[in-house]
Image (tube, coloured by chain):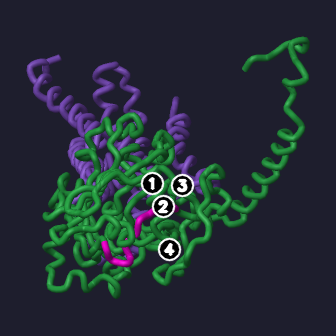
Chain colours: A purple, B green
Amino acid sequence: MFKPIVWLLCLAPLAWLVYSLYRDLGVNPVETVTNTTGIWTLRLIMITLAITPLRWITGINQLINYRRLIGLFAFFYGSLHFLTYFYLDHQFDFAAMFEDVRLRPYITAGFTAFVLMIPLALTSTTGWIRRLGGRNWNLLHKLIYITACAAVLHYYWKVSIKLPPTNPRNYGILVAILLGFRIWRHFARKPASKV
Amino acid sequence: MLIKKAADLRESDVTPKELFLKRREFIAAAGVTAAAVATTGLGVFGVTAPVEAQNPKAQKLTDLKKSPFSTDEKMNSYRDITTYNNYYEFGLDKADPSKYAHTLRPKPWSVVVEGQCGKPGTYNIEDIMKYAPLEERIYRLRCVEAWSMVIPWIGYPMSELLKRFEPTSRAKFVEFKTLLDPKQMPGLSEPALNWPYTEGLRLDEAMHPLTLVGLGVYGEVMPNQNGAPIRLIVPWKYGFKSIKSIVRIRFVENEPLNSWKQQQSQEYGFYANVNPTVDHPRWSQGSERRLGEFFRRKTLMFNGYGDQVASLYNGMDLRKFY
């Protein structure tokens, strides 16, 4: 089993941040922490979304064993990203934060992406899968599709001062491919359902 | 690595003694720095590089006049000021200009003066640097992206420069343009903005005593990434107004179209006065992160220079003229 390796890989960005904290986080450390945790949240979301298509393509069904772990790490980095913002921008002031969420589309998108991950993280245990039933659980966990789209929008709207914003655009294309795959599969699979 | 046989080694291949000793010093110094960093722990958030981190090759500027306009706030380090820059002609990342601006050649340099003035022409930077006594002005700089620094600029009042060119009564605005040379500026290959970078001021803004011809920082000539050899500094406006590496000054009757307004006019205007009550469409301008500080601080009207400049905008709706 490769679980220890997945753990190590997922912890590497955090390890880099902690190491940099003692060495050098750059001229704007808050920005470095925010950007690093943010981009790794997005990357890990992309990886969890890629696992199902990869199973279809490669036939390696064991990949599913790592999806929950990587998804939880996405939530972990998302939480760090959110807490950095909530603490350093708003000093844990709920009213100020909600005002920000209400007024600024990129914050609205980011907040949506994060909040929708909370039920997924909470119901990630085997006990919850049993309690909800596989069908309901699967349905609930389709929320990750909305999270992925909202996360890309959040990124795109934040950096669009830099033109052309190639990075967010590429993540947008990636999400489109990963979700498009599922739509295509959904329709393509129907006639072959007797298999 | 090439491993030479002993027979191939010559006396000259051995590290010279003084270099070897320097290395020892360096290692010792590195140890001290590491210890200092370790003991400060989270203090890295308030990181300030020592002053000796300046560029040893840069020409020093001395005999600087002190200015009553200087703030006594804690200055940002030389490293903060020279490695965290928005200068898209050298790339879009904050660290790009410090990495790539070495290709800029600030010497020889001349500025073309044209338009509604009595003395149009081409002026050398060496002459321009002598038009008035150099002053140190420690100003706040507030970027439109909601971060800020305190910077010890060197220069002299823009009015001293512009008066020499004898603007006529028809000159109502001044337009400035940055160098346009793809050989010196790798970022020009990206259509990030409509090059060359263009900015403008109303003539009374340009002649205001706070408006500076920027020629240096931290006791030396302007580093390339900060807009060598000559730039504009307007401390009560967002940083993008303070155009870098100026090659053209034009006196005009009508309001010039500045690059960022041309790019996204619903987000960036001509005036661009620092104003905590008028938000950027995508983020708040009510607060800012001063580099080196942990939490955000409140943004001041006109970046704290309201007493000096508010009268320039009497009767104007600053929501409309953002």
Where is residue A37? Give x, y as percent. 43, 52
Which residue position holds label 3?
Answer: A26
Residue at (26, 49) in percent of width and height: A156
Q: Residues within 10 Å of mark 2 (few under 14, many from 20)?
A: some
What's the residue type where badge 2 is placed? Met
Task: Give the Cα distance between marks 1 and 4.
Answer: 23 Å
User: Which structural element holds mark 3?
Assistant: loop
From where the camera sits, is residue A143 visible? no
Task: Give the Cα distance between marks 1 and 2.
Answer: 6 Å
Which of the two discs, 1 and 4, labels the residue nearer the N terminus?
Answer: 1
Residue at (51, 72) in percent of width and height: B135
The label nearer to you, 2 versus 3, is 2
Residue pushed farthest front? B118
Above or below B102: residue A55: above
User: Which structural element holds mark 1?
Assistant: helix
What's the residue type where badge 3 is placed? Gly
Q: In front here: B296 or A128?
A: B296
The label nearer to you, 4 versus 3, is 4
Task: Give the Cα distance between marks 2 and 3.
Answer: 33 Å
Which residue position holds label 2?
Answer: B129
Above or below A90: residue B225: above
Which residue position holds label 4?
Answer: B138
Which residue position holds label 1?
Answer: B125
